Image (tube, rainbow, N blue to C red):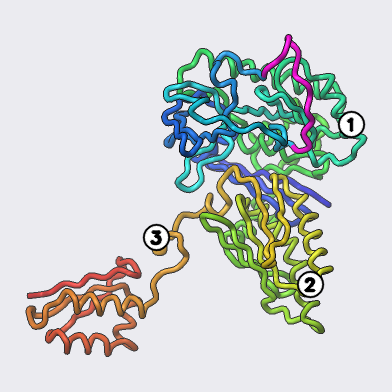
Amino acid sequence: MLKELLVSSNDRETRVAVLEDGRVAEVQIERRRQRGVVGNIYKGRVTRVLPGMQSAFVDIGLEKDAFLYVADVGEEVEDFDRFGASEENGEPLPVTFLDTPGDAEPATRPPLPSIDDLLREGQELVVQVTKDQIAHKGVRITTHVTLPGRTLVYMPTIDHVGVSRRIENEEERTRLKDILVALRKGPGGFIVRTAGEGRAPEEFAADKRYLVRLWDQIRKKGERAGAPTLLHRDLDLTLRAARDVFAQDFATLWVDDDEEYRRIVEFLDQVQPALVGKVKLWRKSSPLFEEYGVDQEIENALKSKVWLKSGGYIVINQTEALVAIDVNTGKFVGKKRLEDTVVRTNMEAVQEIVRQIRLRDLGGLLVVDFIDMEEEEHRRELVAALEAELKKDRSKNRMLPVSEFGLVEITRKRQRQSLERALTMPCPYCSGSGRIKSVPTILLEIRREILKRIPEGEGHSVLMRVHPEIYRALSSDERHLVEELQEHIGMPIHVQSDEHLHHEGYDIVLET
């Protein structure tokens, strides 16, 4: 697979796109005035402790207090000076290996203590943002800090180590575990990142020294500073992409800004010199994202319907609770059996669904409604194909067994707003519902309102101001409604068109 990374930047925003075999697979956008805070570390102050919700709210200096759930609170918060994990006789606790970088705790946990046993109002603690503000919810935080390097993730408050699940070779996993055991002296734990595959022990040691030194600086700053205070800001989108996304399996990193090109080269020269030669400055007159079709893909990602090459299509709808994805045969009618038509549509939809999930950065609970298939073998093939595609996703995800209704449920880690939420705003007409009242509904509302509010024969005339679309209906097909009302109230009704009115809005004035 040919993979390319595109970075387009100006003084207002940075946009990053991942291309796989020429198709856009991922897009991230960061605006200078709306920069996310995921990964930032703060010293905060507890403002409320809610035992009924087993959570607390913490002031970290943002517009809204941050949300802290009891499972994200470490025992070390009671002792502000002790940031490291517990030790016995000065030696690290026994190593527990984790299979996935997302698991920062053992699989089997003791019962969680009550939140009011861990925190009190006014208490100061160091926290890290794990999820940006989404809709009306404030950011989510944890006291379990993680510091990502190029090859390692350092967890100063957790005594466990692991290897990325994307490194599948067992021999390599064993080698990396041996390196971690040798490296692990003192408190805290480490996870080998995917970029650590095949790397020498010296590179891990250098990464460890940098991360431990960084945490020591953050810890000391936290001891001196008052709350709320920003202790550490994560890298901006350009350098995060260079650190977290760009790897040996990428052919090229294209960047269209001279300053960003210089920053990326200098950064990679420190953390991964072998990749510097793959960084190229875009010098063509045509815009980088336009040349690769990224702008059009972003525009398409804001639409609910996605057409498949066969003529079928999928529909993606985001709601507050979940993302619903529906598969339809559309224009594709097949040639022989219905089952063959359905299977081909579903299998084609699998690749596009996963691409759209990554492209739109959809998170939380995703429910996919594939077209019903009669043969069990075809259902097994579909599940296997979906699992294989989901392995391409860098975000942590989990697919549940197919339900008795034929629905496939996927959970996907959500850290930031989806692409749609980041680039759009709620519709001023429908307030985000996607629906507004129909013309007949509004006309009947107007009729009821006039009959209720206008006493028979007590005025000279009635002035009614309506949206232009309602005016057109009252001037043509629904003219009889005005005539009927005039006869009922015994006075003329004057209808005016007002383009400034909401589609559902209207004014009724009794002229005496």
Q: Quadrant of the C terminus?
A: bottom left
440 left or right, relative to 82: left
| Residue 266 image offset from top left, x and y in percent | 71, 28
How far apart marks 1 and 3 lie (CA) works out to 57 Å
Distance from Cα at disc 3 to Cα at disc 2:
40 Å
Which residues, given as a range, are shown in magenta? 86-100
Which residue is the site of mark 3? 428
Between the residue at mark 1 and the residue at mark 2, the CA separation in whole angstroms equals 41 Å
Give the residue type that dot 3 points to.
Answer: Pro
Instruction: Give the residue displayed 77% in from the left and 50% down from the top.
Output: 392
Q: Where is mark 1, residue-wise?
A: 174
Sequence-wise, the earlier of marks 3 and 2 is 2
Of the residues shown, which amino acid type is indicated by label 1?
Answer: Thr
Q: Position of residue 149 (x, y in %)?
A: 72, 28
The residue drawn where x is 33% and y is 81% is 472
Residue where numbered disc 2 is placed: 344
